[in-house]
Every structure is written in structure tokens, then in C-alpha cells.
Image (cartoon, rainbow, N blue to C red):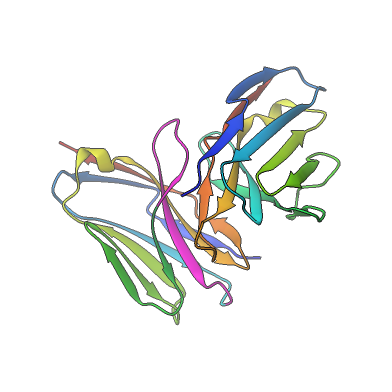
Amino acid sequence: SAVISQKPSRDICQRGTSLTIQCQVDSQVTMMFWYRQQPGQSLTLIATANQGSEATYESGFVIDKFPISRPNLTFSTLTVSNMSPEDSSIYLCSVEGASGGETQYFGPGTRLLVL
Amino acid sequence: GENVEQHPSTLSVQEGDSAVIKCTYSDSASNYFPWYKQELGKRPQLIIDIRSNVGEKKDQRIAVTLNKTAKHFSLHITETQPEDSAVYFCAASNDYKLSFGAGTTVTVRA
């Protein structure tokens, strides 16, 4: 499977600020996804990021709060804007598997704490 | 949207015994069902998956069964070992969108 990295691995931020999380893959992938995992909880899909088109957001997530970029087939960013303590979570990117289909592999995650 | 329910939320088993986790889903259009294992502080790792045209799949000590009519699928771990202790998530996918269950914390007692 692809090697996926995320930056930063963790951060502590002040409320009202924004943080941009990067996801890098070592091979070209069509589909990339962003998930949120709140403390002790399951994973929730935020949006699907496809190169060359606008990200598709799931119910409860909006572009103004979570703008996403997908400039090429190996890279994506997720920005968490105007943060509040409720945004404290692990943010994970995932990519489709090499064989296509619906298999997804996850990056290591970015652990965010908002004070 | 898809709703995935997972049971039990916690499971404690004696080393060497079997563990079974069950999930149900609501959207009959879902056609792909992966299982992920997440150790503390680590990323979710895909351990096995099954597609809607298959009823059962096995990989060493891990097996997954799918009943499309009843809309439920299960994970079976045999001969459990301490390294099987983790949180396990089931998921259902429709059009590449994964909906996850709430997770099962499995503890294997030595």
C-alpha cells in the first residue's frame, strides 16, 4: 500500500486561529479523504478531495470551516478555521488502495488540541 | 445516510479464545465492508474486508461474514493473542464513502 504522511503530527492552538494540515502520498491517487476522530470516538468523514474539482463535504461540515485543497494527485491540505475547543480531535487523511475499488488506507493522523 | 451499529462496545476474552464483533447497516446500497484495527495512538489499519458479492472471507485467524439480506456482518478472531488487544471498527461503504461503527475495545487477558 501507499506510504502516507501527515504534517504536523500534533499541535496545540489557540481558539480563533486556523491550522492547515498536510497529507502527502508517495504515489498518485485519484481519491483522498479527510476524517475526524474526536477523543475516544469513531471516525467521521469530513469530505472527499478529488484533484481538479471542488471537495465534496458531508452533512455537518462546511467549506468555510474546513477548506480543502487538492493541487495534484499526491497532496492535499485540510484547514481547520476559526478553531474552538470543540475542534480538538485527530484529523486523518486516507487514500484509495493501489488496486482501486473502495479500499482506503489511513495516514498517521494529526492530533489537534485547541485551548 | 448510512448508519452502522456495532456491538459489543467492549469485549474481554481469555487468550486463546475466540472474539466476535457484530455490525448492522441500514443502506442496502452499501457494497463494501472493511474492518479496521486501531491501537492506542496509532492510525486505523485495514485488517480484512468483504464485498457484497461474497458471503465469507478468511485470512489466517481472522474471518468476516456478510449477510446482505439481514444487513449485518461480523468479524471473528480465533485463537486470540495479547497483540489482538485494540479497538476494532467496522465500516460500510457506498460510493467510496465509509461510514464507521462506534468501535469495539477488545482486551485479551493473558
- Give the camera-side residue of B62 and A39: B62
Q: Which residues are magenta?
A: B29-46
Query: What quarter of the picture does the C terminus of chain A occupy?
Result: top right
Q: Residue at x 80, y 55 (%)?
A: A52
B91 sits to left or right of A46: left
Q: Quadrant of residue A91?
A: top right
Q: Which residue occupies 50% across, 47% down? A: A2
Q: Residue at x 52, y 73 (%)?
A: B31
**In this orientation, which residue lies closer to the viewer: A59 or A110?**
A110
At which x and y percent is residue B17?
15, 51
Quadrant assignment, res B76: bottom left
Q: Residue furthest right?
A: A64
Q: Residue B84, percent across and down?
A: 27, 43
Provide residue A5's location: percent of width, then percent of height. 56, 35
In the image, taking residue B44 as reference, residue A58 lies left or right, namely right
Q: Residue at x 56, y 70 (%)?
A: B26
Q: How many marks?
A: 0
Relative to A105, say whether B33 is above or below. Answer: below
Determine whether A16 is above or below B38 in the image.
above
Outermost bottom residue: B69
User: Is A103 left, or right, of B106 in this rendering?
Assistant: right
Residue A81 among magenta residues: no
User: Which of B108 and A7 lies nearest the eye of the viewer?
Assistant: A7
Q: Residue furthest front?
A: A27
Q: Does residue B76 lie above or below B28 as drawn?
A: above
Was residue B37 drawn as part of the magenta stretch in this picture? yes
Could you say which is closer to the camera, residue B56 or residue B100?
B56
Position of A103 with respect to B83 (left or right) is: right
Residue B34, x across and y down, in percent = 45, 60
